[in-house]
Image (cartoon, grey):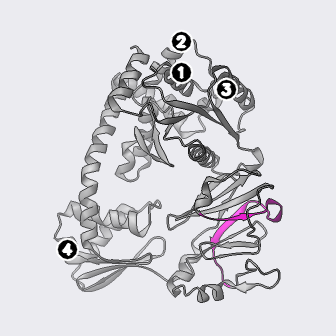
Amino acid sequence: MDLVFDFTQNCKRHLLWKPSDRILIAVSSGVDSMVLLDLIQHLPDSLRPWYGVLHVNHELRSSSIEEERFLENLCYLKKIPYFSRSWKKEEHPEKGIELAARNFRYTFFEEMMELNKATHLLTAHHADDQLETVLMRLVRGGQIDGMVGIKDQRKFGPGVLVRPLLHYSKEDIYAYSKIHQLAYYEDETNSDPMYTRNRYRQRIVPLLKLENDQVLTHFKDFSSDLSDILSITNKVIQEKSELVLVESSSVFYEIDKTTLLSLEPGLQRQVLKYILLNKVYKFQPVETLRKQVEELVGLMTSSKSNAQLDLPKGWKARRQYQQLFLEKTNPEKVKTTCSQKKLFPEQWVFLEDGARVGLFKRDAHVISPYEKDKHIWINPNQVVMPLVIRHRKKGDRMTLKGMQTGRKKIKDILIDQKIPIKMRDEVSVLTDSLGEIIWLLNYKESRLSIPRETDKIQYILVYQE
């Protein structure tokens, strides 16, 4: 296969971008991203927009410095705009380093898209990645939407994330690199069986390819067909969900039992699953979701006119004649089940309500793309890292912005703000490692919140609903 020709035709056929667009390419220096970069360079002028290279040095391997220099030099010689960032070792968490690295990487990508007014971010995921992803999700379990695997395109930051190599195999990519004599680096961790994806890549996928050499195509077709079906059914499920929901708030949902039970049994289950996942738990993972749906159906079809059921994460279902109520239970009990979350620089942390909080260092004179969001500035020398996000506790006090001495109870602040009692114990506070409250999220800033100073290095704390 002539990959250059096929790639060019694919760009034309699917209108992945226009010549007037601006694209950024995530390049690690591995064979996949180096091939993607080379293919972009081979596009005809009529299809090749402005493009630049993004690189993240995670400082996880000794060779990362050499790879970064190689890529920087290559971009310099070819006059390609190059943007990089290092993830300092001292900022690496003790656990969950893969997820933390991904969060760091994509936060950087989003910032660079904002600063460069980029319309597209390109990554080098390919057909083998798709097969591995679908297999892992099937084995791990979860919602059917996740079984679609990796999407060709999705919204990201101010634009679109595109994976133009998703139709090509790893074998195609290696063959192209050999023909065009591309230099690249092999990540030695790709062969480490400690990582789940590597075990699938080394042990399971080769067996499937032996069974059927068209397995990559079949999984690609499966992903495409499932995506089409879900795009149709999800609209119906959402419409029916809005029809059965009589009332909703962050801590209370009322469902009309008669309307719900008038639907086909399969649609009943999907509507309940949609309400739980999208409304009640707000996209947070719930391992027992399928069991909860069955129990809710049983609650509504029971001969008892009044009954109730305990649900995970501090929720309760209550049947009352023709209505079903989903409501948050005693906030004090909910609060004790919520663990605190650590926030490191250049990271996002997601809250239970779907909002997220990020912490980013900003050098002097650099404008942050997050200044349009709710944010505060802090002096890095006045806080002890990492920061901590948790629910408020009884007796919590903070020194408000504008006060040099004295502390006010969080409870009194919430009363002053006229926050309903049910919501008060769901409020989150952000502290440093010594427990000093920096921000009563979304409500009040502490004395540690300072004005933006253009001649000093500062941290910006960002809250996005």
Instruction: Tell me: residue 155, above or below residue 68.
Output: below
Sequence-wise first label, 2 or 1: 1
Question: What whole-number distance in Å separates the C-alpha atoms at marks 3 and 1?
Answer: 13 Å
Tag 4 residue = 259
Nearest-to-viewer mark from 4 and 3: 3
Sequence-wise first label, 3 or 1: 1
Instruction: Tell me: residue 111, above or below residue 45.
Output: below
Q: Residues within 10 Å of mark 1 (few under 14, many from 20)?
A: some
In-image side of 37 versus 152 (left or right): right
- Mark 4–mark 2 contact, CB under 8 Å? no
* Total tally of numbered discs in the picture: 4
- Residue 71: numbered disc: 3
Instruction: Tell me: residue 41, above or below residue 84.
Output: above
In-image side of 144 versus 315 (left or right): left
Nearest-to-viewer mark from 1 and 4: 1
Say what amino acid the circle numbered 3 marks.
Leu
Q: What is the x, y in percent for residue 306?
A: 28, 86
- Mark 2–mark 1 contact, CB under 8 Å? yes
Residue 81, picture quadrant: top right
Instruction: Tell me: residue 430, above or below residue 81.
Output: below
Segment tinted magenta in the rendering: 374-394
SS for tag 1? helix
Tag 1 residue = 38
Tag 2 residue = 180
In the picture, which quadrant includes the N terminus?
top left
Q: What is the x, y in percent for residue 59?
A: 72, 38
SS for tag 4? helix
Sequence-wise first label, 1 or 4: 1
Question: What whole-number distance in Å separates the C-alpha atoms at marks 1 and 4?
Answer: 57 Å
